[in-house]
Amino acid sequence: MAPSTAADLTRRRNILICAPRVAHMNIFHSLDRYGIQNFEFFHTNDHAATNRDRAFLAKVETMRPSHIIHVPTIMAVPGNISLETMGGIRRTLGIPIINYHLDAIKPVWRAMVIHLAQEADLVILLDGAAPEPYAQRFPRPETKCISLWSPTPAQYAKTSADSLQALEKDISVSFLGTLSGYTDRSEIIDHLLANNINVTVNAPGQYLEADSYYQILRRSQIVINFSTIQNWQKYGARPIYQLKGRVFEAAACHSFLLEQDNPLTPRYFTPGVEYDSFTDPADALAKIRRYLLDTGTRKAMAARMHRSFMEKYHPRIFWERVFAAL
C-alpha cells in the first residue's frame, strides 16, 4: 500500500466543533480553506443543561469524529460539556480533544483553561498568552499547550495585486468590537466622533454574520483596534493586553490597522512598517487624520501587512500547526 499523503490525511479528518453558536465564525471558514470539508457543529447554547451532555454524546455516536474541537464558554456561564463526558469520549473512543480558548489571559479565564485541560489532548491559546505558565499547572503533564493567532478565513482576503488595488474603500474608519463595558474604547471612539471622524461601529448587542462583518472590514480605509481586556483595572495598576483577532482580520482584508499600543502585536507584525499604534485619544485622532490624507503610505503599509498575513498567518498554516502539535 502506498504511504498516505498530507492531502489524504486532511481528507480523513472528520471534525466535530463543540461551541456556542456565536463562537464558530473563524473556525468554520478557516477549516474549509485548509481543505477539511467534513466538519460539523454542536452548538452548546442550543441545548438545555439537563440534556446537553446526552445530546452531545448522541452527536458523537452518530458522527464518530476523528477530532473534537471544544470552544468553552467562561466558567461563570453554564454551557460547557461536562469534564466527565469529555473524558469518557477521549478515553473510551480514543478521540483527541482540542480545547480552543479565545480568551486565556484574564485571571478567571486562566483558571478555566487549567481546569478544563484535565480532559484535553491539546490546548490552544489564541489571545497572546504564553503557554508555559498554563502547561506547568495542567493536571496531566502529557496535555500539550500552544499559543497561536486567530485563524482568519482567507476567502475574505484578496490575493492578487490587481484585486487588492481595486478594492473600494468607502468607509473611513471602522471598529466592530464591543464598546459596552470598555471605558477606554468608548473614550477614544467618543473623542473621534466629537472631532468629526466618521467611525462605523456595531450597534449595542449587534452580532454581524461573517459576510457582513468582513465586508465592512474590506471597505474600511482604517480599522481601529483596542488591546486591553475588559475592566483590567480590577486586576492591578498595569493594563492587561490581549492579541486580538481583529489584527489578523484587518491584515486579511488589506485594510490599514491602527491599534492601541501593546507588546503582543509586534511579535507578529512590524509597527511603523505594516501597521501603526496610538497611545491616547489625541494620538489616535492625529494619526487617523494623517493616514486618511496620506493615502500612499496607508496603502503601502496595509499591503505589507497583508503579504505577511498570507505568508505567515494564513489559516492553512494555522491548522498545520494545530495538527502537528497533537
Image: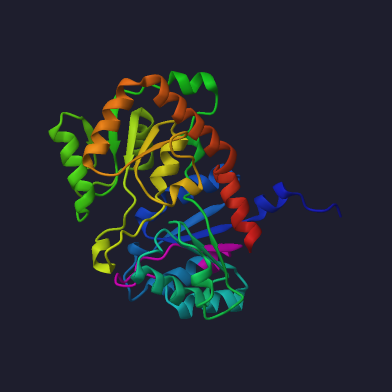
108 left or right of 124 in image: left
Q: Nearer the viewer, residue 26 or 219?
A: 219
Q: Is residue 37 visible?
A: no
What is the chief secondary structure element of the magenta stretch? loop
Whether residue 74 is in magenta: the answer is yes
Q: Residue at x 30, y 26 (%)?
A: 290
Q: Quadrant of the C terminus?
A: bottom right
Q: Residue at x 58, y 51 (%)?
A: 319
Q: Quadrant of the N terminus?
A: bottom right
97 left or right of 103 in image: right
- Specify start and end residues of the magenta stretch as a single range: 60-80
Vertical arrangement, residue 126 with respect to residue 120, above or below: above
Vertical arrangement, residue 292 with respect to residue 42, above or below: above
Whether residue 155 is in magenta: the answer is no
Question: What percent of the width, then of the height, locates residue 197?
Answer: 20, 30
161 left or right of 217 in image: right
Q: Residue at x 20, y 41 (%)?
A: 189
Question: What percent of the width, then of the height, locates residue 291?
Answer: 33, 26
Question: What percent of the width, then of the height, locates residue 58?
Answer: 48, 70
